[in-house]
Amino acid sequence: MGYTGVVFGNVVVIMQTKRDLDSPAAISDFVESFYNQLLADKELSPIFVDTAKIELEHHLPKIKAFWRKLLLGETGYNSHMMNIHRDVHQQQAFTARHFSRWLSFFEATLDESFQGPYTERARNVARSIATNLQEALLNPADYSQRTRYIEERAQPIGSIRKPA
């Protein structure tokens, strides 16, 4: 977050400004803040820590690479997200509440510190992730057998242009 000042006569008003998720540094800050919230949550933390047994020093770089790929078009993330979550789901079944809670933390983290077209793309992608995973894992018989890419429900990367 940054600050901007506006002068009204003899009064200077300092306002906090939000930045966009348009750089690796912003994405890194977002992911770290988001995971701090997830891992502090009594409902979601056990899924990450006890079931998936994530180690933050290995997990966070992958998540950051995932978001850099989707938001900035970078290469480097090659894992299959659906398969990873299927494995966790087999160990401990996800519920609709898990996906809803995950999404609410995601959006709250965005709303707290970020705004702009890349932020809105991240919001759209996160909604698609939650919807796709919930449909595929909780209702596999109803879920389309074709691969459903997150990008089908989100604005294409090329439609967002970074301000000059």
Image (cartoon, rainbow, N blue to C red):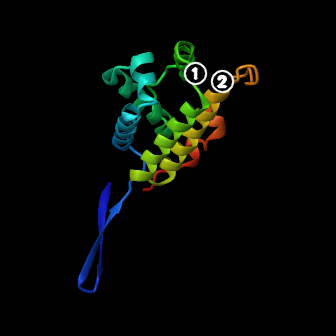
Side of 33 relative to 44 (left or right): left
* Circle 1 Cα neighbour tier, 10 Å, few/some/many (<14 / 14–19 / ≥20): some
User: What residue lies at 70% left-to-right and 23% top-to-bottom?
Assistant: 139
The residue lying furthest to the left in this view is 10
Name the kind of residue labelled 2 in the image: Leu
Q: Which of marks 2 and 1 is in front?
A: 2
Residue pictured at 63% horizontal, 29% vertical: 134
Report helix, strand or loop for mark 2: helix
Does the CB distance between marks 2 and 1 fall below 8 Å? no
Q: Which residue extends farthest front? A: 42
Can I make out residue 114 in this image?
no
What percent of the width, then of the height, locates residue 156?
60, 42
Q: Give the image location of residue 140, x and y in percent.
A: 70, 20
Nearest to N terminus: mark 2 or mark 1: 1
**Is residue 51 placed above or below 98 in the rendered structure?**
above
Q: Residue 138 carries which label?
A: 2
Quarter of the image that includes the C terminus: bottom left
Which residue is the site of mark 1?
A: 82
Q: Which of these two is toward me, 108 or 21?
A: 108
Residue 14 picture quarter: bottom left
Q: Is residue 144 visible?
A: yes
